[in-house]
Image (cartoon, coloured by chain):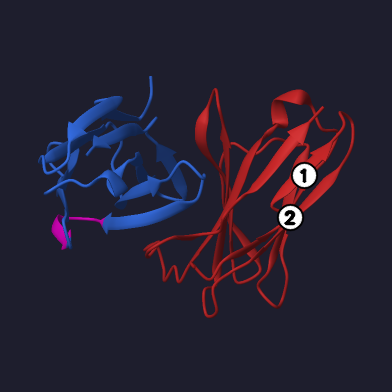
Amino acid sequence: DSGVTQTPKHLITATGQRVTLRCSPRSGDLSVYWYQQSLDQGLQFLIQYYNGEERAKGNILERFSAQQFPDLHSELNLSSLELGDSALYFCASSVAIGSNTGELFFGEGSRLTVL
Amino acid sequence: KNEVEQSPQNLTAQEGEFITINCSYSVGISALHWLQQHPGGGIVSLFMLSSGKKKHGRLIATINIQEKHSSLHITASHPRDSAVYICAVKKGGQFYFGTGTSLTVIP
């Protein structure tokens, strides 16, 4: 058990819809990272939050947004869903002091299927 | 061009064999991570390296910053080591991932 909790584990929805994925980081970890893993593109970095503020942005689509709340949990919002958004979405957390990521602890992932 | 290249893509080994997975990258990095992903999908971080060598049990990871190359070694491989191993590098705030090496260890 990594200590990182992601919900829901599975989600099936239709094109055009909006979903919210939730991540609770390990106790004490200030950084949260979101990643997407699809069959055709592998793992991709989406976005990082550190102590409530956006720290780095990767290949995140404009239809996607994220935030980190004062209690350090994070949510990834995916809107106007397309078939190609079907993927595993992972959250990871770390202590992340300065530019040092520190070890990453991954949640079990949320599997999104868009029909 | 992918910033991170892994080899081999697929690897089958007999139980007990010594295994090496290679990772080459083209960008200057602040850290390199080796990740393990089992068939169920969960990801575990094995190592984070910025220089030198680290060892954990039967796993050894090395990095050569000048040559932009890292290796993951598994000694005395076991069927439970069967998984996908992914190399990831961090440059600034960005992560770049290799496509993974699928390892199968046969009893």
Q: Is residue B42 above or below residue A63?
A: below
| Chain letter of the residue beneath label 1 in the structure image | A
Residue A108: give x, y in percent of width and height.
Answer: 57, 55
Could you say which chain is coloured blue in the image? B
Image quarter of the C terminus of chain B: top left
Could you say which chain is coloured red in the image? A
Magenta-colored stretch includes residue A114: no
In percent of the image, x 23 and y 55: which residue is there?
B50
Amino acid marked by disc 1 = Leu
Residue A69: give x, y in percent of width and height.
Answer: 73, 70
Q: Secondary structure at mark 1?
A: strand
Residue A65: give x, y in percent of width and height.
Answer: 74, 48
Q: Which mark is residue A8?
A: 2
In percent of the image, x 41 and y 55: which residue is there?
B44
List the residue tagged with mark 1.
Answer: A11
The magenta span reads: B49-55
By secondary structure, the bulk of the magenta-drawn segment is best described as strand
Relative to A53, is A26 on the left or the right? Answer: left
Are the two marked residues, 1 and 2, in contact with CB atoms closer than 8 angstroms? yes
